[in-house]
Image: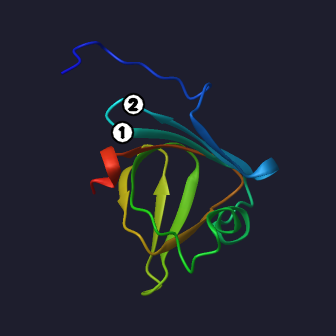
Amino acid sequence: MDNTIETRRFERPDEALDMQEMGGINIVRMRDGTAGMYAVFEPGWTWENDEKPLLGSPDSCPMRHTGYCIAGRLMVRMVETGAETLIETGDFFEIPPGHDACVDGSERVEMILFEGPAHEH
């Protein structure tokens, strides 16, 4: 068992999802496989137009997201039911797979997302 403290920075990501002028997601991975993601979505960003093509165009986002909204408002829709939830600054959230989303309003959305080792949840 390694008992040293590990730190990572989003400025030096292990992976990055580049959505050009519409935003992006910087991903850092810890030794145990835990991931942290810093996501930025600019006004006008939609999952359909800006992220879906980068994921191989699934019908909806296949990932579960646990995170915290630092800034902005994101409207998240469960594709199967059409249920919409507004996530805004200060919200801690969990979004199940099977959703899409779009920026709500004229403010940039910034979020921190967490993922357990080997997609535990």
Residue with the mark numbered 1: 33
Furthest residue in direction front, as rendered: 1
Q: Nearer the viewer, residue 75 or 33?
A: 33
Is residue 52 in view?
yes
In this view of the protein, which residue sits in the foreground, 103 or 12? 12
Residue 67 in the image: above or below residue 97: above
In this view, the residue in front, 105 or 78, is 78
Residue 62 drawn at (x, y percent) = 47, 69
Disc marking residue 30: 2
Q: Are marks 2 and 1 in contact (CB under 8 Å)?
A: yes
Residue at (45, 75) in percent of width and height: 98
Q: Amino acid at mark 2?
A: Met
Residue at coordinates 35% horizontally, 39% vertically from top-left? Answer: 34
Tell me the quarter of the image containing the N terminus: top left
Q: Residues within 10 Å of mark 1 (few under 14, many from 20)?
A: few
119 relative to 28, above or below: below
Indicate whether 10 appears above or below 46. Answer: above
Give the side of residue 81 with respect to residue 4, left or right. right
